[in-house]
Image (cartoon, rainbow, N blue to C red):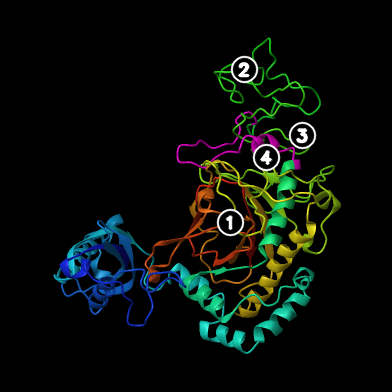
Amino acid sequence: MRWRLELEVVPGDAGSEEEPGIDAAGTDPCAPPGAAADAVPGWCTRVFTAMRSTSRLPRSGAAVEWCGWRAEPFMFGAHKMVVLIVLHLRADDGDGGGMCGEASAADAADEVTALAGSLAELVQGAHVTARSRLADDGADDALATCRRLFVPVAEAEARVDARDLTAQAAASARRDPAATASRGGRILTRAHVRSLLDDGFVILETFVPPAVAVGAARLVAASLSADTVVQAGVAGGGPVARADAQPAGSDCAPQSEPADCAPQSEPADCAPQSEPADCAPQSEPADCAPQSEPADCAPQSEPADCAPQSEPADCAPQSEPADCAPQSEPADCAPAPLPSGDTRPLRWRWPEPRTARGDCVAWVDTRFASHVPDALAKLPALQPTSPLAPTASDVDGGPSSPPARAGAAAPAADFQTVPAADFQTVLARLAALQAELLALAADRALVGEREVQAAYYAPNGCGYRRHTDALPTADGGGAQRKVSAVVYCNGGWVEAHGGALRVTLQDHRGGGTVDVPPRAGRCVLFLSGCVQHEVRPSFAPRYALTAWYW
């Protein structure tokens, strides 16, 4: 059986005064690719090197796998280190029942702590901060599993160097009209491929020109502004994913009965000014209106939205069945064909659970890379003062003046037209990226399918809690997401805007985190089943286009 430990090590007198340094290979073993070699103190490398010379603990007999480490701030400018370890216990060390191996793992953890403490000059103290049981010894970790979707690193690099990637990608592109529309040249380099397969993710700078990314965001924002189904929620900033938030699903349309608070064929009776709301059952208070104020679900000039202003009105859309309790499709799958009479090319919605995510999303037809329908291309352009306007600056992608306060939107660029061509360019580049990934994939590991989603985060501190996009798998076929690509469309992004993508590093990189600002034109490519990530609170309108490949 295997147990994973995180061991916190505090420097001793000889370690706290050392200059920054690098490991024997000349690289920082815990930092993401491209990080400065002197970003961590040299004593960490000395401690890790000394500890990993022990491959088996003498008392418990457990085999030790030294995965990696990371440095964290400690006090008075000093650093502590966190060492990631996997213990392989013998099969006869279990103590039976549901706690099989717990006592043996605790004893082995004490041995590891004592081992660190024996480095008296470098280490002042050490203790285990986390211990968890892993799968069977024969199972790979998530990164190793997902990495088998592609040929080995050396072979992948050889394909890039020999220009096989270009030829094979071209062959894949001929089967995908959207990919042939891309004019930006080859995307992946040797360094990109190694980073993706070694670390699970890679940052592709200038995946598209920043001006193009911002142009795509303008079209997405115009669509969001014109979508009456979610407009009430958008105007109020939308639900916010916070720890103390309640799920935003409306209670006025339970699955066992129709929503009476907003019938399509007659005016709403749920909140007349002169009598109590009829939309709430007599035995319980009306859920669609706050108890302390008059019901807002029946404004005089429009049908009842029955959701408070801080939540989207998903329970009674005018032209489609209630989204708050769908019976025919899961919440996160691509939508079915548009119902009769629904001409919206992008169908916006607030996905669940709202306690974990604060984005508003719409599925994008991948055929839009070749042709954008008039219903989308001829939408009224947003004005710079619109609360939905994407951030931009005079030079797209350059820094704009930070907002005067948290929550204020940055200045927006000229919005005389809705640039459908920019939107098409981003979609075509995502198709071309898929063609290159197919050229690097193992036999039948990727089937050549993809889905694309547009996402908007309101400037009210909403985000998305840490998660992975799929379970780790190396099996070909099926519709499970294998690779994710997020293209950011926010020009003039500054630190005050927040909204960074926080990526959790793999164990061999120390298991820390790295924040990626969502600047216009940047793409983050990662393996869907093994890279944990989250969206930090956003304080400016935040737009992105995400593709998932399988």
- Looking at marks 3 and 4 on the same chain, the residue that comes earlier in the sequence is marked by 3
Q: Which residue is mark 3?
A: 318
Whole-number angstrom distance, CA of label 3 to CA of label 1: 41 Å
Label 2 vs label 3, nearer the camera = 2
Q: Which residue is mark 2?
A: 294
Going by the numbered disc 4, the residue's amino acid type is Asp
Whole-number angstrom distance, CA of label 2 to CA of label 3: 23 Å
Label 1 vs label 4, nearer the camera = 1
Tell me which residue sits at (76%, 26%) in the image: 302
In magenta segment, residue 227: yes
Q: Which residue is mark 1?
A: 399
Give the image location of residue 292, x and y in percent: 54, 18
Q: Which residues are magenta?
A: 226-253
Give the image location of residue 128, x and y in percent: 25, 60
Q: Secondary structure at mark 3?
A: loop
Going by the numbered disc 1, the residue's amino acid type is Pro
Label 2 CA crowd tier, 10 Å (few <14, some 14–19, many 20+): few
- Looking at marks 1 and 4 on the same chain, the residue that comes earlier in the sequence is marked by 4
Going by the numbered disc 3, the residue's amino acid type is Gln
